[in-house]
Structures are given as C-alpha cells and as structure tokens.
Amino acid sequence: DGGTLDVDVKPRLGPAEEFMREVDGNADLLDLARVPLFLLLLISMSRRGQMLPTRRFDVYENVIDQLLEDHQNRRAVASSARDRPPLHPRHLRELLARLAFEYQRRVVFGPIAERVVETDIRRALCDPDFLAMAPAEATAVAADLVDVAEGQIGVLVRQGTRHLGFLHRVLQAQLAAEHGAHHLDQAAVAQVFADRASDPRWTQVRSEEHTS
C-alpha cells in the first residue's frame, strides 16, 4: 500500500563498547577492572573472543592459567638449551599452590628472600606426597625455577635484587585455597581457618575454599 515500515534498529556495539557493557553490568568485574593487572586480563580475554567470567574467583583462576601458559611457551623455546625439561604445567601449578599456602600459613604476604623460596621449593619437590625428587635433582630444579622467576614465571616474580613474591596478593590467596581444597583433609582445613579467623588477610582464602 506504499507505506513505510518503521523499524527500531539499535546500532551494533563495537568491541570496546561491548566490553564496557559487560564489565559495567557485573559488580565483580567492575571492581576488578579498577586494578590494571585484572583490567588487562579482561581486555585480553575479550579480544580473544572469550566470554568474560561472572565471578571474581574465576578471573583470578584465569589470570593464573594465562600466566602459567605464557611461562610454558617461553620455557618450551628455551628448553632446547637445557638438559632438564621444564616441570609439567600441572606440577608447576601445584608447586606454586604449595608455596602460596605455606606463605599464607606463615603470614608472609610481601617479598620473600630468594634463598628462602629456593629452600621451600626444594623441600616441596622432595616431598614423597608430591614429586619425591632426589635431593640433587630438587636442588637443580629449584635453582632453575628461582632463576626463571627473574621474570618468566609470571605468578612468582622478582621484587628487588634478592627477593621474590607473588605478582598480586589475591593470586597467592587463590593458589593457597586450591592447595587447601585439594590436599588437606577437612579437619586440617578447619583448624587452619580457626587459628586465623580474625586475620583479614585470610578472607580471600576462606571465600575461595567455600566455592571449591
């Protein structure tokens, strides 16, 4: 009949606008986006076409996954120059989780002396409940890992000339929670939390433990 049909067509959002819409629509993401480290991760996920997590704990886990993946890629390139192959990604993550839990238990949240980290790595690698390495092998692997922490592990980074630490405190808490959830029995977990019930620095660990 010659008339025109009015259709309300909304303009298609560009990638940047779509990203901001997703972040603005989630209180956890909006809060995390105020931290440059997590903002960069969220942008990276969005650019790769991944769906953004809806919970902050999923973001923390994704940060660790991405940093360890980057580490493994770099180590794969360098492995041809070394006699020892790098630790399996699962073992590296479990090792970092053990360290994180131990430092949370000791109430250590800042830079840690390199020799202390190396000793703790060596002890963990020799643990018969973990990799049960021979002392000589564990010593060599620990030295390699501390050297790699010069900037390639990502999760554990150099903080000053002779100190190391976790890239961000929440990553230490996330990994500590993973260790508690998968390697401690319920009684041991309950005792650890009871001993530190009033310590706000353990809030992250308790929260993640309850979501595992």
Image: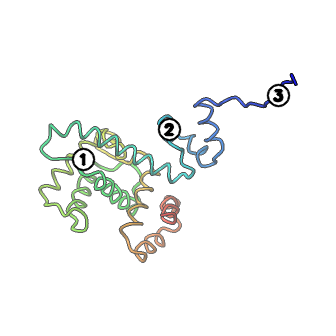
Question: Closer to the observer: label 1 or label 3?
Answer: 3
Question: Closer to the observer: label 2 or label 3?
Answer: 3
Coloring scheme used: rainbow
Amino acid carrying mark 2 in the image: Gly
Q: Which mark is residue 108?
A: none
| Residue 136 x/y as whole percent | 11, 56
Q: Which mark is residue 145?
A: 1
Quadrant location of residue 107?
bottom left
Q: Is residue 121 left or right of residue 41?
A: left
Q: Is residue 146 left or right of residue 187?
A: left
Q: Is residue 39 above or below residue 156?
A: above
> How much space separates mark 1 and mark 2, taking CA atoms?
32 Å
Q: Which residue is mark 3?
A: 5
> How much space separates mark 2 and mark 3, taking CA atoms?
35 Å
Q: Is residue 109 left or right of residue 9?
A: left
| Upstream in sequence: badge 1 or badge 3 | 3
| Upstream in sequence: badge 2 or badge 3 | 3
Q: Which residue is mark 2?
A: 49
| Upstream in sequence: badge 1 or badge 2 | 2
Image marks 1 and 2: residues in contact by CB distance under 8 Å: no
Q: Secondary structure at mark 1?
A: helix
